[in-house]
Image (spheres, rainbow, N blue to C red):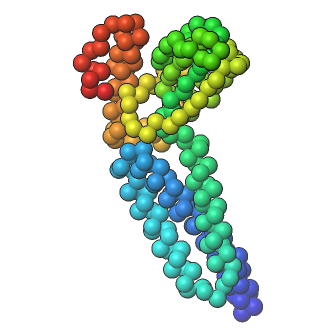
Amino acid sequence: MNVFLDDSALFNWVILPLLIYLARLADVSLGTMSIITLSRGLRRIAPVLGFFEVLIWLVTLRQIFNDLGNPLCSLAYAGGFASGVYSGMWIEHRLAMGLRVIRIITRYDARELIQNLRERGFVVTAINAEGSNGPAKMIFTVVKRRDVAVVKQMTWKCNPKAFLSVESVDESPPALFPGAGRSPLPVWLPLFSGLSPVSSLLQRNEAVAHEAERLTNGESASPLSGRA
């Protein structure tokens, strides 16, 4: 009888709060990922994540109401929520989904930087500009978010005093994805490669890159540019 009471106390005051904490951690993380995938246009993935999020939440909430007299369960519920917010932000940072436009402004010779970026597979547009201290070169490139660090490192290696700004791309422009210089895709992304808009962007990558090279070389735009 004492063993049973000890086991019951262990479950109510240790195991149960721990399970509630982990469940809340999981459902808040799923909720964060659901919002992110929805904002990225992955509309078939977000409902699946939302389904499991609410399912875990209902099971956890039911257990909370069954043990209102246990303060550790309430603390575990609140702690799981706070940890889930942090976990969701960490997952989003690690996946690094989305696109970024990078603007580089330098007063020094940028030919080496432009050549290095193009050799790594980044499609670059460079124009002459006029700064407060004289002529300058302005360089534009649109990259995947996970490749921003690569472009920064290459820029500061060639031009340590270059001015660099990074902005988010909210809509879906004719994005140019790097080839040889890009990082591996997330493990789960190929599972949904047939979903829109991921598949359409990947399928148009080669054609859009070829069109950008035509425009850079001063050739006339093809009908592709009107549809992009």
Closer to us: 85 or 167: 167
Residue that appears at 41% across and 62% down: 51
Given the current orientation, which residue lies at the most extreme left position?
223
Query: Residue 76 at x, y = what percent?
Result: 66, 72
Closer to us: 62 or 178: 178
Residue that appears at 43% across and 40% down: 170
Number of callouts: 0
109 to 103, vertically: above or below: above
Residue that appears at 49% across and 59% down: 31
Query: Residue 132 at x, y = what percent?
Result: 62, 18
Query: Residue 171 at x, y = what percent?
Result: 39, 38
95 to 221, vertically: above or below: below
Given the current orientation, which residue lies at the most extreme front position?
132
| Left or right position of 218 against 140 | left
Closer to us: 144 or 142: 142
Residue that appears at 38% across and 46% down: 42
| Left or right position of 164 against 57 | right
- Residue 185 visible in the current orientation: no
In the picture, the quarter occupied by the C terminus is top left
Query: Residue 28 at x, y = what percent?
Result: 54, 62
In the picture, the quarter occupied by the N terminus is bottom right
Given the current orientation, which residue lies at the most extreme bottom position?
1
- Residue 25 visible in the current orientation: yes
